[in-house]
Amino acid sequence: MSSTSRTSRRRALTACATAVVLTALLAACGPGGAAHDSAGTHHDPAASAPASAADPSGHPAAGAADGMADMPGPDGGTGLTDTVQGYRLTAPDTPLPAGAAADYRFTVTGPDGRAVTDFAVDQTQRMHFYAVRSDLTGFQHLHPTMAADGTWTASLAALAPGTWRTYASFVPKSGGAAGSALVLSRPVTVPGTAAAVPLPPAATTAQVDGYTVTVRGEPMARMAHPMTVHIARDGGPVTDLQPYLDTYAHLTAVHAGDLAFAHLHPATAVDGDHGGPDLTFHAEFPQAGDWRLFLQFRAGGRLHTAELTLRVG
């Protein structure tokens, strides 16, 4: 074999080997071209646990993950953990009473282990606190008070028996996470007999206190989409919404599969008591599935909360 033939043969073999390696790398990366490690998918044994008296919904337990729990959401996470970026939500592991108002006390500690007392104002408040029942039939949104030592107190209205999840949504004013919106959560039990309540089917409209709320838009998971809420009363558009938390409506979403949390940010500017009928939100859901929407708006001097199930593709 001539020297020229041997050189051509080596070049051909090298090209073939390169093609094989490149093909293997592309297969590992998947269609998006980024490496996908299936071993990193997170599963919680509680996700397949059967319903019980403490969790009557038939949904996975409040802290369960379905492979998406560690994916960053629009508010610094999906709210399914008590620790994010070194910040930790701490509270006594004691049940709350059923059928009676109760104070829920908690503390947020920073990466240094000390109680945080320096919070930025977000939508007129330094802390937004939520309590959500595991079957999504219970929802409370409160603004707790903080003592000098960093202990927060949320005055909860009466809770029905079952498993609940409490969320603390805040923005640190200093430190490494300064300016970042974070959501931390913990489960809490309310003893008693809990009746199973199925999740209402997906819908685009809801009725509350004589108002009709209509949601328009087709949000997709992990993608930013505009979403519009239309508010009407007696068949006519509502144009006298009053400001609430420096906006015309506050929209919270909780995932039916694992109680992942999403706070949808309003985009409509406030101009006195002239809100409505159409309100625009920046919607970004961290995962697909059924989400329960809780829309809070002020009209006629009262705060109203409309609820509906939204299907996210």
Image: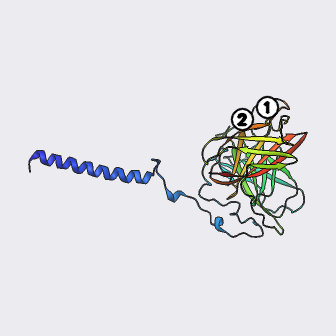
Which one is nearer the viewer's eye here, 104 or 202? 202
Q: Which percent across, then down, holds residue 254? A: 72, 52
Instruction: Estimate the spatial distance between the alpha carbons at disc 2 and disc 1, rounded to whole Å.
Output: 9 Å
Which one is nearer the viewer's eye here, 48 or 143? 48
**Residue furthest toward the left?**
2
Give me the residue at 60% from left, 50% from top.
71
Q: Amino acid at mark 1?
A: Val
**Please, which colouring scheme is shown?**
rainbow
Does residue 193 appear left or right of residue 71 in this picture?
A: right
Give me the residue at 76% from left, 52% from top.
308
Q: Is residue 101 above or below residue 33?
A: below
**Residue furthest toward the front?**
235
Do we see residue 67 in this rendering? yes
Does residue 33 appear left or right of residue 297 in this picture?
A: left
Q: Are marks 2 and 1 in contact (CB under 8 Å)?
A: no
Which one is nearer the viewer's eye here, 58 or 274? 274
Q: Amino acid at mark 2?
A: Ala
Give me the residue at 59% from left, 57% from top.
67
